[in-house]
Image (cartoon, rainbow, N blue to C red):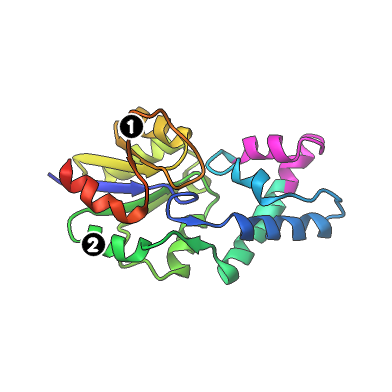
Amino acid sequence: MKTGIFFDLDGTLWDAVESITTSWNIKLKDLGYSLKLTPEQLQKEMGKLMEDIADSVFSEIKKPTRYDVLKQCMDYEMEYLKEHGGVLYPEVEITLKQLKESYFLAVISNGQETYVKDFIEFFRFEKYFDDYEEAGRTGFSKDKNIELVAKRNHLERVFYVGDIEADMIAAEQSGATFIHAAYGFGTVPGDRLKIESFKDLPALLKNL
């Protein structure tokens, strides 16, 4: 059976909230806004679709201007992350190397176009990931992107590792088995499979 392990990015593989917050605040200041965001604010938005994030954090900016402001912040974010990156969770690379021996690995994110690609290239993880997809490239929701990558790679079974309830819902809507990254940004109902650290994943999968 050809099995895929798909990963969410923010709150699962890395924490880029500090870098994202810094980049957005730089751009907001450049655009003449006094609004200053905190990492705590943006952490709550991780995993959401872009328009929903704009409605939440830029609610004081009128529509449709807030969407243009978000786009400019995110465009600058991409430049910033290419240079500064985010923080990998402990033992991610050594665990990916182990998983790669037995599984098809992919990243599925709600991020903008090239967000996953830039992450992979920043850490030189091309040797670990077989595929990736993101909402900014396809325009699809996360569940549809999970289905898309599974279908085009002829996978018979898929596990999706994510940290928030939206990841769980997307996984279950796509037919994937959800595994909660409990060290990440969010919580899910307590009866789901979970890992307390990234390095626990191979043992959990082996037991399944």
What's the residue type where badge 1 is placed? Arg
Mark 2 neighbour density, 10 Å: few (under 14) some (14–19) many (20 or more):
some
Tell me which amino acid carries mark 2: Gln
Query: Of the residues under marks 1 and 2, which one precedes in the sequence?
Result: 2
With 156 as the anchor, is 134 left or right in this view? right
Taking the magenta stretch, the answer to whether it contains residue 61 is yes
Q: Is residue 44 magenta?
A: no
In this picture, residue 28 sits left or right of residue 99: right
Which residue lies most toward the left here? 1
CA separation in Å, label 1 and label 2? 23 Å
Report crowding for label 1: few under 14, some 14 to 19, many 20 or more residues within 10 A (C-alpha). Answer: few
Q: Secondary structure at mark 1?
A: loop
Q: Which residues are magenta?
A: 50-69
* Label number found at residue 77: none
Q: Is residue 14 above or below residue 35?
A: below
Can you say which quadrant of the picture contains the C terminus? top left
Q: Mark 2 = which residue?
A: 98
Query: Which of 81 and 86 lies nearest the eye of the viewer?
Result: 86
Q: Is residue 38 left or right of residue 165?
A: right
Rendering coords of residue 26 (x, y %): 76, 61
Q: What residue would you read off at disc 1? A: 192
Tag 2's secondary structure? Answer: helix
Image quadrant holding the N terminus, namely top left
Where residue 40 appears, as percent x and y from the top left, is 65, 46
Can you see residue 181? yes
Instruction: Check the image and report above or below for 130 versus 146.
Output: below
Residue 19 picture location, percent across and down: 62, 61
Q: Residue at x 23, y 53 (%)?
A: 202
Left or right of 33: which side holds 115? left
Number of on-image labels: 2
Q: Quadrant of residue 148?
A: top left
Residue name at image x 29 percent, y 52 percent: 200
